[in-house]
Amino acid sequence: MSNIKLKEKIAYGLGDAASSMFWKIFGMYALFFYTDVLGITSAAAGTMFLIARIWDSFFDLGVGIMADRTQTKWGRYRPYLLWFAIPFSVMGAITFFVPDFGATGKLVYAYVTYSLMMIVYSLINVPYASLLGVLSSDSQERNILSSYRMSFAFIGSFITFMLLQPLVDGFAEVFGSKNSADISGAAPNAPVTGISTQPIGWTLAVAVIGVLCTLLFFLCFKGTRERVSAVSGNGAAAAKGTVKNDLKALFKNTPWWILVATGLAALLFNAVRDGVAIFYFRDYVRLHYKMPVTGWDITTIYFLIGQAANLVGVILAPRISLKYGKKKTYMVAMALAGILSVIFFFIPNHFGWILLLQALISVCAGYVLPLLWSMFADIVDYNELKTKRRSAGLIFSSSSMSQKLGWAVGSAMTGWLLFLFGYNKGLAQQAVYTILGERLMISLLPAVCCGIALMSMFFYPLSEKKVKEIAEQLAAQEGRM
């Protein structure tokens, strides 16, 4: 058992802080940007999300396979943090740039830049996720590392929500056009939004956050160390495993299939809730308020409350899962999140009630993600015991794949459902059925996703006792640290 110091745990967490800064922008603001700033329809944006993310999800597997076979003086996975930190931030700014093209040109630009952004995201995030499998061989220590990772992920998201709207509005005021309707295509009677639709504001704001991401990736690279060997048991002979054999072994891994299904449902839950929130507040809640000094509107406050509550869940998850087990903790959290999501639909249109339910649901959601990542690390051990190869990159890339597939389907569904419910960015007051659709998308539909995740986890076979036995067998085979 290795003894990882606090400094390294923090350094590892900084990597996901960087990833989450951009992930939250894409998850919560991208649909609004593409419809109300770039000017394409919600249906077109939803289709783009699905196409770009589905093929990129399978690209993740390729990145994982490549990372497993990377040999450098820095290790297998850490070098990618160094190589792609700058392209990560540059592509973010380019993605949120609005070119002076026609409708077709803007749509093509969106497809190309969004797809490239997802590729770069994979090239840095899959190896980063794989680090968890080689920083330590101890399951409980990985659980703690996963908690640090998720804690810093939510801290990074919190920082993004604190900065994004003030930056967008500030840059728009200084550098933007006086008539944003001419740029975004909005009608003169368009609704007053809580965040500017000036394109220059979005480009510069994302660029600033991108610089922060790059610095955090560099710190993560510098402060971590890979400890666990790529092979076990048969040594050099095991290292000769082919991609075909690695994939074949993975597809026979029953616990892996269950976690992929569970991860898909959990991320679908988050994607739909987050993606529709800005529309829900503007069209249903309609409380046009901005805090003094910070300039945060009610949607930003809602997001900030959610991230703070997520962080509480992340912090509590290791302690509770240590007592009750990862599987049971996960199932209880998803059940509560589903029940609370149903209640969300029936609460009054009052900001206090909305924030209360958002906080409670987000605490439950905060439990889920660190447990998922920690269980994927357990599957790395399970697979190694079966195959004598430690394919951490391949297995963690599959977890990233399920994450992206969940967001792909969730984002696409959000865009399509908004279109089907008649969303029109040029209307100051959306139709009654449009608003009803937005309410369903932030409450009852996510509740269904919780039910699917709960049922999938019921069949997960790796108990705490089984995971401990696997770790002991692996330790006996190669005398790990």
Image (tube, helix red, strand yellow):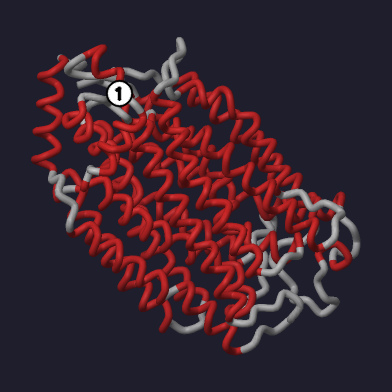
What number of labels is visible? Answer: 1
Q: Is residue 471 left or right of residue 111?
A: left
Taking depth in this image into account, of 224 and 461 the one nearest to the observer is 461
Query: Can residue 310 be seen?
Result: yes
Which residue is painted at 25% across and 52% down in the image?
A: 258
Quarter of the view holding residue 453: bottom left
Compared with 383, 237 (above or below) is above
Q: Is residue 31 left or right of residue 152?
A: right
Quarter of the view holding residue 7: top left
Compared with 37, 217 (above or below) is above
Considering every residue shown, the one lying at the far bottom of the view is 432
Which residue is painted at 25% across and 63% down in the image?
A: 454
Is disc 1 surrounded by few (<14), some (14 to 19) or many (20+) residues within 10 Å?
some
What residue is pinned by disc 1?
Answer: 241
Q: If the image is split into quadrants, where does the C terminus sit?
A: top left
Q: Is residue 174 left or right of residue 376?
A: right
Residue 373 point in image, percent of width and height: 33, 42
Residue 279 point in image, percent of width and height: 61, 71
Taking depth in this image into account, of 452 and 285 the one nearest to the observer is 452
Taking depth in this image into account, of 428 and 97 the one nearest to the observer is 97
Residue type at tag 1: Gly
Compared with 74, 34 (above or below) is below
Which residue is painted at 23% across and 64% down in the image?
A: 455
Which residue is painted at 38% across and 72% down in the image?
A: 341
Compared with 280, 221 (above or below) is above
**Label 1 secondary element:** loop
